[in-house]
Image: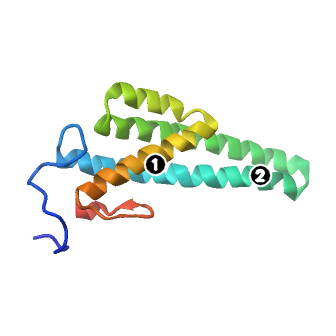
C-alpha cells in the first residue's frame, strides 16, 4: 500500500502519457524534468546577471565575468538540449525530440521550449497521481 491514501489508483506497470506506458519511463520523465527545471533556473539567473553586470562598473574584471557567464550559459544550453531530447523521446516521438532539442539552442526560444516541455511533463506526472513541487516530482513516489 502506498503512503498516500488519496492517491489515485494506478494499474500495475502502466503509466499514462508516456509512449511505452511503462513505469520506468515515468521515472525517466521525472528525472529529466528535474534536469530541465535546473536548466530553467540557471538560464533565468544568468539572464538577470547579464542585465545587472554592466551596472557594476570596472570593465576589465567584468569582461572576464561576462565571458564565464556566457560559457556557463552555453553549457547549460547543451544540458537543456539533452534533457529536452531525452524527455521528448519518452513523451513524443524521436523526430519531435530532435526538433525541440534544436530549438532549445536558440536563446529566447529555448527558454520557451524548456517551459513548454516542463509543463507537459508536469501534466503527465500529475495524471499518474504524482505530486510535483517546485523542483520536480519526488522520485520515491514513483
Task: Point out the residue furthest to the top here.
Answer: 95
Q: Label 2, label 1: how many angstroms apart (C-alpha)?
A: 23 Å
Mark 2 and mark 1 in contact? Answer it, CB < 8 Å: no
Query: Could one spot residue 30 in this view of the protein?
Result: no
Residue at 45% in and 27% down: 99
Percent from the top left, x then y, of residue 88?
36, 37
Q: Residues within 10 Å of mark 1 (few under 14, many from 20)?
A: many
- Location of the N terminus by quadrant is bottom left
Percent from the top left, x then y, of residue 127?
25, 55
Residue at 13% in and 58% down: 10
> To which quarter of the image does residue 5 belong?
bottom left
- Location of the C terminus by quadrant is bottom left
Q: Which of the two residues, 118 or 137, is positioned nearer the viewer here? A: 118
As drawn, is 26 to the left or to the right of 48?
A: left
> To which quarter of the image does residue 77 belong?
top right
Task: Tell how many labels.
Answer: 2
Residue at 33% in and 53% down: 123
Mark 1, secondary structure of its residue: helix
The residue wearing badge 2 is 51
Q: Which of the two residues, 130 or 28, is positioned nearer the viewer here? A: 130
Task: Point out the residue furthest to the right here.
Answer: 58
Q: Residues within 10 Å of mark 2 (few under 14, many from 20)?
A: few
Residue at 52% in and 31% down: 103
The residue wearing badge 1 is 36
Q: Which mark is residue 1?
A: none
- Please say if 34 is above or below 114: below
Query: Could one spot residue 138 in this view of the protein?
Result: yes
Amino acid at each position: 500500500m502506498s503512503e498516500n491514501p488519496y492517491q489515485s489508483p494506478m494499474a500495475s506497470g502502466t503509466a499514462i502519457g508516456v509512449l511505452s506506458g511503462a513505469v520506468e519511463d515515468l521515472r525517466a520523465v521525472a528525472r529529466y524534468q528535474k534536469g530541465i527545471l535546473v536548466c530553467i533556473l540557471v538560464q533565468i539567473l544568468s539572464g538577470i546577471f547579464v542585465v545587472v553586470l554592466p551596472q557594476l562598473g570596472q570593465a576589465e574584471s567584468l569582461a572576464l565575468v561576462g565571458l564565464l557567464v556566457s560559457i556557463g550559459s552555453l553549457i547549460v544550453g547543451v544540458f537543456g538540449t539533452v534533457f529536452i531530447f531525452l524527455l521528448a523521446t519518452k513523451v513524443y516521438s524521436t523526430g519531435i525530440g530532435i526538433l525541440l532539442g534544436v530549438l532549445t539552442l536558440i536563446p529566447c526560444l529555448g527558454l520557451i521550449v524548456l517551459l513548454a516541455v516542463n509543463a507537459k511533463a508536469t501534466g503527465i506526472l500529475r495524471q499518474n497521481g504524482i505530486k510535483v513541487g517546485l523542483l520536480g516530482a519526488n522520485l520515491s513516489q514513483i
